[in-house]
Image (cartoon, coloured by chain):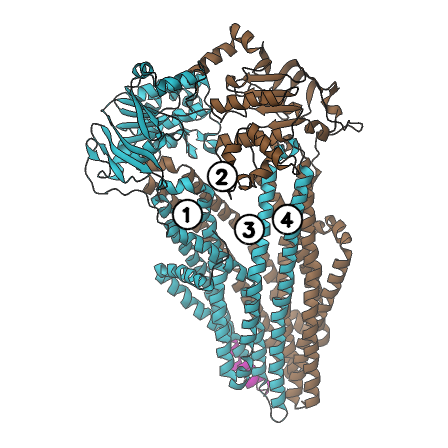
Chain colours: A cyan, B brown
Amino acid sequence: MNDGTLTAKEQRRVLWRLLAYMGRYKKETALAFTLLLLATTGELAGPYLVKVFIDDYLVPGRFDFGPVAALAAVYLGVLVLKTIISYFQLVEFQRLALYVIQAMRMDVFAKVHRLGMSYFDRTPGGSIVSRVTNDTEAIKDMFISVLAAFVQNGLFVIGVFAAMFSLNVRLALFCLFILPAIALIMKTYRRYSSVFYQEMRERLSELNAKLNESLQGMAIVQAFRQQRRLYQEFAAVNEAHYKAGMKNIRLDGLLLRPAVDMVYMLSIMVVLSFFGVTAFDSPVEIGVLYAFVNYLERFFEPVTQMMMRLSLYQQAIVSASRVFALLDHQEEAPANPDGSSHAIERGEIEFRDVSFSYDGKRDVLKRLSFVIRPGQTVAFVGHTGSGKSSIINLLMRFYEFDRGDILIDGRSIRDYSRAELRRRLGLVLQDPFLFYGTVKENIRMYNEKLSDDQIREAARLVQADAFIERLPGGYDHVLAERGATLSSGQRQLLSFARTIAADPKILVLDEATAHIDTETEEAIQDALARMRKGRTTIVIAHRLSTIQDADQIFVLHRGEIVERGTHQQLLAQKGLYYQMYLLQNGLVDAHV
Amino acid sequence: MSVFRDLFWFFRQEKKAYITGIFVLVIVAFLETVPPKVIGLLVDHMKNGTMTKGVLIRWIAVLAAVAAALYGLRYAWRICIFGAAVKLARQLRNELYQHFTNMSPSFYQRKRIGDLMAHATNDLQAIQQTAGSGILTLVDSVMLGGFVLATMTFSISWKLTLISLLPLPVMAAATSRYGTILHRRFLTAQEAFSSLNDKVQESISGIRVIKAFGYEEHDVEAFRRQSEDVVAKNVAVAKIDALFDPTIGLLVGLSFFLAVAFGSQMVLAGELTIGELVSFTTYLGLLIWPMLAFGWLFNIVERGRASYDRVRALLAEQNEITERPDAVGVPPQGDIEYRIRQFVYPGEAKPALTDVHFWLKRGATLGVVGKTGAGKTTLLRLLLREFDGYDGEIRFGGRDIRDYTLSALRSAIGYVPQDHFLFSTSIRDNIAFAKPEAREDEIVRAARLANIHDDILQFPDGYETIIGERGVSLSGGQKQRLSIARALLIDPEVLIFDDALSAVDAKTEARILAALKQERRGKTTIIAAHRLSAVEHADWILVLDGGRIVQAGTHRQLMAEDGWYRDMHRRQQLEALAE
């Protein structure tokens, strides 16, 4: 994603799409705008009332108690009312912004879950997370402090001019010079600040990236004695960041508050000259002058505020464009008919002439065909890249295939509902993933129908109950940092229990490779043997030792099954399997 | 305000900028009192019909001059004060970085990287704000507030000033009270947001599990609940946040009301001219900012002090690994001898190593094996002098390793750690990390030795390929081999492999080990491994368990013994990898 290089047209399109979200909250939007209109009117009424007081009572020196008291009462009434209304107006605008962001977050998150596995395999997790949270958060900031402020201040500006025109058309016309002057300053400021600010942000993220990396790799940096060199590199980035910061300060100094204040002074000079010239030959309405000065005084602060927030706007548009890009991303998970009532009963699996390619160029599976009878255990072995994992990816519907067919109980897996497939197919991953929460919650996941007894039963079956009960709190033990305190074997057992609790008909095991000590290994093998009972099982094996009792072993090589049979049969064939077996056991330095 | 005293060293260092800046600010504050005065004067001229061309031109000219001066001066103080503040951040950031590079691993064990990052970003930001906006607010609110008050009191009416200022302290109190509540609610909202972030993180990391179980919709539902909580907490923030402007508006409105109400009575009584009343109300407008600013000032200073205290505490951390004054600067060569009675990690109770004694001849290869947590890595880290607090000594080339300078000691060692850390730059820069000036052929040679050269040529830009988040992602085995190449490039006296071959397949492992044997003749190699095949050819093998040496010998000797080594060897043969 190339940040900040959106054309003006793209920016506008993104903005409109953002604003369109408000359409989902018509009532809230209408309420917020109504309140805003009222509050602005109240805001503008103040100086007008004072003007009436000055011109009608103070200057002539007429001080009738009744009307003056009434005027004072109106002023105070309006003031209090305006205060209350503008409070609710502010709350409503923020609420609206929060709703909009909430809606957008739901859209993004739901979209993420509809995306296919291919997207997740290619995209770094961090950047997906950023889309859902940080980018939407940046948009929230803009909605609250920029859009709301723009609308509020914009309306206020219009109101001020309306009030000035009603007081004195000629003078108001003179004051119109403010608008192009401000517009010019704003435009110039925006043109430079979008560049300067962007540069500063880039330097800052470079700085942070550098620091973060150095901290993570400090052991290496010190072991290889590169502290000084990295310090110099860091100092150079720091210097660049400093320069970028100074540029921003200079720009702000030239075009922000000092410049806006200058326009304010000019406008005061215009008003005074106008009244001054008028006063050469006729009396002037002091109250009108007061009102003008007062309006102008209030006019400029919001303008400065808006300008200071322009950079937020820029940032949010970039964020929004990234969010929309994700929302528009076409890489949905393979589709299945929702209403399908076909059920998986026996658990027979057949691959019929299945070919598959990730990139559309190189086939990782080539016309693969095999049948697994219900209740059988079948293992796939082969080198990295032989296509073992692709079999899981297709069977689990993580990826769509286009050639051949995969059948369960004689029916294409495309014809079952997703729910049925998920219920009947139990996948155990190489890397057991645990969620934040208790042991019980990790076994149950979102399956509310599971009773506590069923959970215990599942844990017992895979023999995880012993260690679970030793944990403080047992099944209610909260797993810190996704189970970091458990050994990898224990984590694996928990994920077994999770799968078994769902009672699948077909078990798909992506066997763990390394990092399990030999002691736990035995417990795991034992658990697996129990789990396989009565289930069709597919094992993607990395160790030949664990699959010797499989009913059938398929040896994959470059996407094709090159050997098949039982362990003994395959050894007797003296083919690839035999070679691998020898290599693994270190008996011969085989040259495969 | 004590933070200003703590930062005084910096104000002194940048005294030119600060003195100029503050001086300019004072002038600005003074000049700001001019326009309301002029407005009042002209209003009186108009009212009394004494307005002439000369008067008008004169005063408009004054305003123009003031406007021009203000523009220039406002720019000037910004450069002085804000500029100095950015300089402070730069300086502290450099200091922190340098400090970080000097800290030993025990420091990094105690601190989380996320926290250190937060110090270097958020805390520095808060300090920068204190030295910039903090100073500005202090000077400006005191000076501008003072000038305006003085003008109102002395040149218009002290009575009116007193009356119309009545609501303003309420305003300062209220806004500062809101600020406290807001801060609290804001933190709660931040927490809700960060747990939402964790939730998303978890969902993305566990996407396979969620998809495998078909829980996508449930997960979206769970996300909805949590994000609604975020909305609720943010609405709570909004409810306080929205109090600020209306409250200010109300009290300022009251203030104006009092000014006009009482002021006009004074006008009628002849104590005040209408012009003075108009300029009085304009002054009131000028007072709002200093009042509010004073409330902010406390927030800024509060945060700045907390941040500066944290940064100072960090900078005050001492590195426990120190060099002796008479340390030898020549890299060690020769035999290595461990004589360690006990080593306990700082803050832990159980010793990590006990009675580890052995002698390693120069040029020999030592294998270290044992279960996870047996002490293999600890043994290696002590040689690198990552920790000092052990009972005993390690001798290298006839001297205690603590007699060498850190730089000399480490320049003799090539270290390949367990968790292969690479930098997100080009492959070339990663290999040449310890020797940036290395020649092309040196780099290629190291890469070939580590069996990674062919892989590198497969990448789009060969050796120039950028790796890491912004570039190509490498497999675990490739990362390991790259970090091996990095260590080999400096052709170290001692090469240390800390389970550095775990992710490469058996064939590659054998090839790398064979290449090392040939290339590193006469140089010492220490290999710690989980897989015994990596140490089979070592001249001597130590088996560690619970921090003690439980077996020692050559492969042949150990295989003849009934013990952990032979047991493990058999098991591993059974479970060896199919790659």
From the image, give the main secondary structure of the stretch colored magenta: helix
Residue B315 appearing in the image: yes
**Residue type, numbered disc 3:** His
**In this image, A415 relative to A66: left or right?**
left
**Do badges 3 and 4 share one subunit?**
no
**Do badges 1 and 4 share one subunit?**
no
CA–CA distance in space, label 1 to label 2: 42 Å
Question: In the rendered image of this protein, does residue B101 appear above or below residue B528?
Answer: below
**Residue type, numbered disc 1:** Ser
**In this image, B564 relative to B100: left or right?**
left
Judged from this view, the residue extending furthest toward the front is B441
Residue B165 appearing in the image: no
Q: Circle 4 sits on which residue?
A: A237
**In the structure shown, which secondary structural element does the residue marked by tag 3 occupy?**
helix
Residue at coordinates 37% horizontally, 24% vertically from top-left?
A541
Q: Circle 1 sits on which residue?
A: B227
Chain ID at mark 1: B
State which mark lies toward you, 2 or 4. 2
Q: Circle 2 sits on which residue?
A: B459
CA–CA distance in space, label 3 to label 1: 21 Å
**What x and y, as percent, mark residue B503?**
49, 27
State which mark lies toward you, 1 or 4. 4
Could you say which quadrant of the image residue A289 lies in?
bottom right
Q: Circle 3 sits on which residue?
A: B183
CA–CA distance in space, label 3 to label 2: 51 Å
**Residue type, numbered disc 2:** Phe
Q: Nearer the viewer, residue A183 or B482?
A: B482
CA–CA distance in space, label 2 to label 4: 28 Å
Whether tag 2 and tag 4 are in contact, CB under 8 A, the answer is: no
Residues shaded magenta: A51-73
